[in-house]
Amino acid sequence: MTASVSLLGLATAVPPFVLEQGDIAGRTHVLFGPLFARFPQLADVFANAGIARRYSVRPVDWFYRPLDWGERAKAYVEGASELFLKAAREALARSRLSPADVDIVVTVSSTGIATPSLEARVGQVLGLRPDVVRVPVFGLGCAGGVAGLALASRLARAEPGKTVLLVVVELCTLAFRRDRAAKADVIATALFGDGAAAAVLRAGAERAAIARIGSAGEHLWPNTLDIMGWSVDPVGFGVLLSRALPRFVEQRIAAPLQRFIDGAELDPAARLVCHPGGAKVLAALESALRLAPGTLADERAVLKDFGNMSAPTVLFVLERAHASGQAGPCALSALGPGFTASFLALDLTMPGPHSHDGRLRPEPQYAA
C-alpha cells in the first residue's frame, strides 16, 4: 500500500422531500400509463428494487409540470448548493476544522451543469478562503464517490500538510422524464434519489483519523459506452441504462477487482464497501465475488433507506460501516459510465463509535 492519507471526517446529507416507494409506484402508473399497458411487468421494478424511500430536492408534484433545461438547471444549482453546504459543514465539524482551514476543494457531480461551479457559488457562504484551489469534476456518474475520494487523496498526498475537502453531490431526480416513456425511464424512477457526502483529508498518520487511505485503481472496459450514461436533448438529461448491466457485473467485475486487491497488497479478507446500484447489481456482485447472499448488508440498508443516489451512495455505505464499529482493511468499489470500475484501498481505524481521544463519535446524521 502506498503512503497513507488520513480521512479526518465524513458526513452525508439528504434534501427535505421524501419519496415513499409505494406512493411513487402508484403515481408512475398514471405518468407512464401506456408504457405499463405494453409492459405490465414494469410494475415489479418498484416492488423488487429493495427501496423503501428516497429523497428529492423538489416535492413530487413539481415533476408533473413540463420541465425544460432552464428549470432543471435552476433546481440543480439551488438544491446542489444547499446539500454542498450541509455535507461540507458537518464533515468539517467532525474533523474539528473550520472552512478557512481548507486548502483544496474537490467537487464531484454529474447530474447538473453549473458554471461557475458549485464550490465557487457557495465558497464565500461556507467560509472558504479566496485562495482555495478548486477542482470541479464532471462525468464520473455512480463511480464518482470512489474516484473522487481517490483524487482527493492523491492531491493530499502530493501536497503534505494541505487540507483537502471533497464534496460529492448528485440530484438524480432532476433527470425524471415522462416525455420519453422508455423502460429505462421507469427503472430510473424506481431507483434514483438525491444526496450528498463530504470528506476531509490530509496526508500523514493523523491521530484522530477515522481511516487511512491507500492505493487507488480503475478499470475501463472497451466498447461499453452504451451500458450507462446520459443522452442530452432540449428537455434535459436522459438516462442510459442497459438491462445487461447486472449480467455484465456478474461476469466481468471479479478479475479487475482481484488485480487491484493484489496490487494494493490488501488482506484477502478485506471488507468490500460497494456502491449499491440496485438490488440486482448487489446480487450480481455477491455472485461474482463468491460472497454469501446477503453479505453486502450495509449496502442493502443504504439502498433501502435512500435509493441509488449515484456517486455519494458508496460514501453513505462507508459512513454506516464506520458507525457500526467495523474496522480494518476495506476495498471501496463503484461502477460508472465508461463503462468503468473505480477502486480504493483504505483501513478503517476506529474499532467502535468512539474517537481516538475517547469522546463519543456521533452516529450518522442525514441532514435534511
Image: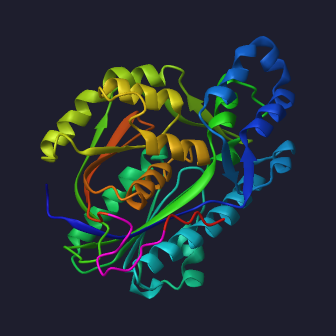
Q: Position of residue 159 (x, y in %)?
A: 23, 75
- Relative vertical location of residue 342 with respect to residue 288 in this rendering, above or below: below
x, y percentage for residue 325?
A: 36, 59
Quadrant showing the N terminus: bottom left
Residue at x 83% of width, y 27% of height? 29
- Tell me which residue sits at (28%, 57%) in the image: 327
Say whether residue 54 is magenta. Answer: no
Q: In this rendering, does residue 135 appear at all?
A: yes
Q: Quadrant of residue 58?
A: bottom right
Horizontal and vertical percent position of residue 31: 84, 31
Vertical arrangement, residue 194 with respect to residue 256, above or below: below
State the image quarter where residue 320 is shown.
bottom left
Magenta range is 352-362
Residue 61: horizontal and vertical position, in percent? 86, 48
- Residue at 81 percent across and 48 percent down: it is 60
* Residue 166 is at least partly visible in this image: no
Residue drawn 56% across the image and 29% down it: 241
Name the image quarter holding the C terminus.
Answer: bottom right
Q: Is residue 353 magenta?
A: yes
